[in-house]
Image (cartoon, rainbow, N blue to C red):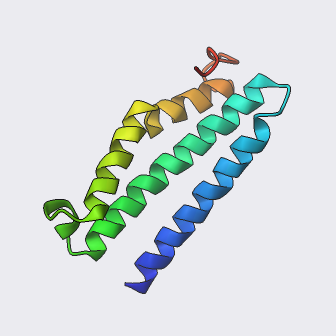
Amino acid sequence: MQHRAVDMFVELEQSRSMAMYAAMMVGESDSTECERAISAAKVQIGRSAKSIGHESIQLHGGIGMTMEYSIGHFFKRVTMINTLFGDTNHHLARLAALEGMDGEQALEPLA
């Protein structure tokens, strides 16, 4: 059980680091760099949120989703937010396009 808690902590810290990096890049004059940082942060945060949610529910024996525990409500909200702002696959494709991996240099700016 301890290794699961440690894995969740590492995921959380990686997400915090990426969020701070994206926040620092917002002030950059190069908008493409800013968009790359935001998409990279969204990929990490989306993956971490899903991983932490799954682990949290498993630590409670799966009853987090069936009973009215707070973790079930939080996980449902995280899933909804992830879909609302573009899921991990969307931002991976966006990041690849911004890096020029598919022949394009940039996409339309973030809304």
Residue visible at 50% across and 77% down in the picture:
6
- Vertical comparison of 35 with 19: above or below: above
Task: From the viewer's perspective, tell me whether residue 109 is left or right of residue 71.
Answer: right
How far across and down, in percent of the image, does residue 1 sit?
Answer: 37, 84
Whole-percent x and y of residue 60? 25, 75
Using the image, determine if residue 12 lies above or below residue 37. below
Q: Residue furthest right?
A: 29
Up/down of 27 relative to 7, above or below: above
In this rendering, position of residue 56 left or right of residue 25: left
Which residue is rendered at x = 47% and y = 47% of the image?
Answer: 46
Q: Residue 36: image x %, image y %?
A: 68, 33
Quadrant for the C terminus, please. Answer: top right
Q: Give the vertical position of 91 relative to 57 (above or below).
A: above
Relative to residue 33, is residue 68 drawn left or right?
A: left
Asked which quadrant contains residue 100, the reply is top right
The structure residue drawn at horizontal position 70% and vertical position 42%, both measured from the top left corner, is 22
Q: Residue at x 19, y 60 (%)?
A: 65
Residue sitting at the far bottom: 2
Instruction: Count how many numbered circles sit on residues in the image.
Output: 0
